Amino acid sequence: MFMQIAIGAIGIGVILMVGYIVIAQVKTALPTPQATYANSCFGSANISDTTLCNTTAVPCGPTTDNLSALISCDNAEFLSGTGSAQATVFAGFGLLAVGIIVLAAFGLINVFK
């Protein structure tokens, strides 16, 4: 039974490792998409105005432009989504290691039986 569990863990780990490689390659191959947000500071005479130039409403950081209606920056949702998917698949490396350790322990137990 332990051997079947170990082989299953190794299989799942290998699948997750392949997924990690695919996600990492896709993440580096694709350019980071740009997200466009409405500029709340558009038309404001004073850029340091905290009411109109709200820096927390736009994930791009501080609003330093009051001449354009839209602000473009890296899509934070894309970056966090691919990062968390990559971290989840990275857990497969740990599962693979555990499966190999259990399989090795099972083999040692059978050798010294």
Image (tube, rainbow, N blue to C red):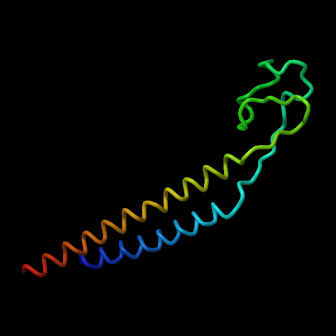
Residue at image coords 79%, 19%: 48
Say which of 44 and 9 sits in front. 44
On the rendered image, what quadrant is the C terminus found in? bottom left
Q: Nearer the viewer, residue 16 or 34?
A: 34
Total numbered circles: 0
Give the image location of residue 88, x and y in percent. Answer: 49, 58
Q: Is residue 63 above or below residue 16?
A: above
Q: Is residue 54 left or right of residue 106?
A: right
| Residue at position x 86%, y 39% in the image | 70
The residue sitting at 84% across, 34% down in the picture is: 39
Q: Position of residue 30 (x, y in %)?
A: 70, 62
Residue 41 appears in which quarter of the rendering? top right
* Location of the N terminus (image quadrant): bottom left
Is residue 111 rendered to the left or right of residue 25?
left
Q: Quadrant of residue 105?
A: bottom left
> 79 or 5, which is in the foreground?
79
Above-or-below relation of 68 to 2: above
Q: Position of residue 52 (x, y in %)?
A: 82, 23
Residue at x 53%, y 59% (from the top left corner): 86
For residue 71, above or below residue 8: above
In percent of width and height, residue 7 lies at 32, 78
